[in-house]
Image: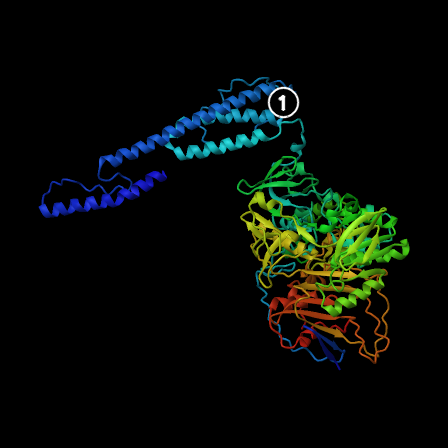
Amino acid sequence: MLKCRTVWKKLAPLARASSTVCRQNVRRTGNVTLTCVPVAHMSTGPAGGGRENQLYVLLVGAACVGGAIYTYRTVKGDNQRYQDRIDEISSRPYKRATEEPATPIQSEPPAAESPAEPTEPQPEVVAESGKTVVHLSWVLMIIQDHALTVSLFCFLPFSFFSLSLSRARCRSLMQTPGGPAPASLKVPSHTPYLLIGGGTASFAAARSIRARDPGAKVLIVTDEPDPPYMRPPLSKELWFSNDPSVTETLRFKQWNGKERSIYFQPPSFYINAEELDGAENGGVAVLTGKKVVHMDVRGNKIKLDDDTEISYDKCLIATGGVPRNLQVIERAGEEVMKKTTLFRKIEDFKSLDKVSRNIKSITIIGGGFLGSELACALGRRSTEYDLEVVQMFPEKGNMGKVLPEYLSNWTTEKVKSEGVKVISEALVKSVVCKDDKLEIKLKDGRLVKTDHIVAAVGLEPNVDLAKSAGLEVDSDFGGFRVNAELQARSNIWVAGDAACFYDIRLGRRRVEHHDHAVVSGRLAGENMTGANKPYWHQSMFWSDLGPDVGYEAIGIVDSSLPTVGVFAKATAKDTPKAATEKSGTGIRSESETEDTAISPVASLTPAPNVGQHKDEYGKGVIFYLRDKVVVGIILWNVFNRMPIARKIIKDGEEHADLNEVAKLFNIHDD
Amino acid sequence: MSYCRQEGKDRIIFVTKEDHEAPSNAELVADDPNDPYEEQGLILPNGDINWNCPCLGGMASGPCGSQFKEAFSCFHYSKEEVKGSECIDNFRNMQECMQRYPELYPQEEDKESSQAEASSSSVSAAPTEGSALPPETDSTPATSTSESAVSSDSTSLIDNQTAS
């Protein structure tokens, strides 16, 4: 067709020219009888000259003949393959009854269909997918035969299209393993909402979808063996539990004293995957232990690691990430790797808990949130279990990339008082295993001997599906690149740790916090059900470092930004406050949630000699500025004020005096 | 008196209680209650129920979600003198459903009262008596829309939390 068009384009000026000439002739001669009649009214008609006409017909004819030959050969080949398959399968005896072939047939089927089904070997054969497949492909081929003869000369391009489609279907069907495994039956072949990944973002999206789309059927596919659970307690509350069976029950005490499990919902909340299709009111089904290995965006379907295919209407990618490891450890060999924990999942918590009880010394590499929290948690155990806890990191102090230097130093002192040996400005050069102990050599020559290493050096977002799905990956922040509505492509959204999204206020970013997973998961769920809302509600995060230090933060909290910190000054009138009112610790793992008001964490006793300006950063507010606008806020030991902080960031205004802004927080109140 | 110090790019200010006694002159931008981007509380500006409100926990999305929605909608739109009196059947259905999932909907008295606090005042009423609506079975640390629920006086948006 394209050839014809180009040919015509060349001929069109010729046509116009010849018609003009004709008309001019007529006018000149005044002759009524026209020698050449302009035929330009037909847009695709051949123009002056029989030669072009013949050329055109020749081209079309050649294309038709070529198409006929191609399709004939293809069908013949398929036929042959079918025969081979039949022979192969008939040598395998089966007993089950035939099932209804469910594959929709896409090519144009004229009436003459199935009567021509000769060799259906044994009638009792078949529920096995292989045989069904073969049966279907035969049916399709018959149809193709007829479809071809009818459509070839009428709808040449269409027949090519349908042929290729049906062939593709055949091919994919043929490739489905025809083994005796009925496992594929358990999994629905189609789900309206598919959520890849079974973490916080996925669960939040599932809930959002179910709330907004009544009767929605949601399928969560996760490669972990557990249903969705929350991560923060794994490095905080679970370590402070007095329950000896905590590794089994995975229950912890919240800040308000109430106990709960880390699982978002007990198993009875979910329905079985195989019941999903038939569920009258829909539901959420979780498919555990299955990894999505391939994503076909055009066909709206994914493939699992056991080759099952599931098609979807809307899909969420919430694959989270994998903990990073240090190159030196990876290169150090099997022995060292066996004594290294990369902490992220429930199984990591269980194994670390077990290990920490049986060793003498443990080293945590990494001074960020996870590293510091684990160091504090293990530090508390150090006295009980005679365990030496070492924490090392390249920065000058704990949370060095988050807190301004003065606060980072102060925090480091606090961590030390929790029983942790902190080695700052430590760059690991090599790790070897000697006499069943690990020897960590630092670049400045220091040597640390330990029994076990926990590497908390960051998260690598899981973008394995980007390649097969053809999704963009962000080079600055990592993760899938999505727009402000968390959409990657038409029916695909990404949320949680893996999403590099556009924040209207703060610019493009990728956030690895729990509340962000909840907020983005909810938003993705809303958008999957038609809301079209951008990321607007700013998520927050928090951290606790022992019973004295707890903070909440929101926005961009990067220590490289200029900061202004406003702290409550200790006066002579201040008296040491009682320890926290609740259950021994002020540990909290829930951000501003539905429940009742939060009781405050104990404030620090003021410095003993108040006369001098000893800096005790008991409580206060720290503003992070970018171009004089507040882009991040830390609430240091003040709680229940997050909405104010959120509002200030949302406004994005330049404030001349941040002390005035700090007044809004009433930091002196409890 | 407060004092101030500069450490490189970071400024540190120490303030006493007296320093902060005077009201702030910081200006905050007025919020638009009809902003479509903002998170909504339990009741939307047009009067409908926001089923996705974190304050509801998993009530609207669980196995008994549809029963819950019917019952609560009926109650919400009820114009009877005794609000929700015509919704007894709906609530009974909901209760029956919830009894089938005791793990998800523990049948406890005090849970019900905490739910009453957590939802807006219009929710707290009698119909929720037998069954419990525990927010903490699935208290995903949610976002601050729950603050509006916590205040439990108004059913409107989170903006009422902004310091005045």
Q: Quadrant of the N terminus of chain B?
A: bottom right
> Which residue in the protein does label 1 denote?
A97
Q: How is the image coloured?
A: rainbow
Q: How many marks?
A: 1
- Chain under numbered label 1: A
Residue A481 horizontal/vertical position (percent): 58, 53
Q: Quadrant of residue B16?
A: bottom right
Dot 1, crowdedness within 10 Å: few (<14), some or many (≥20)? few
Residue A313 in sight in this render? no
Q: Quadrant of the C terminus of chain B?
A: bottom right
Which residue appears farthest toward the bottom when viewing the image?
B1
Q: Residue at x 36, y 40 (%)?
A: A2
Relative to A618, residue A58 above or below? above
Q: Residue at x 28, y 34 (%)?
A: A55
Q: Amino acid at mark 1?
A: Ala
A438 vs A338, nearest the viewer: A438
Residue A414 in sight in this render? yes
Residue A298 horizontal/vertical position (percent): 53, 42
A496 vs A612, nearest the viewer: A612
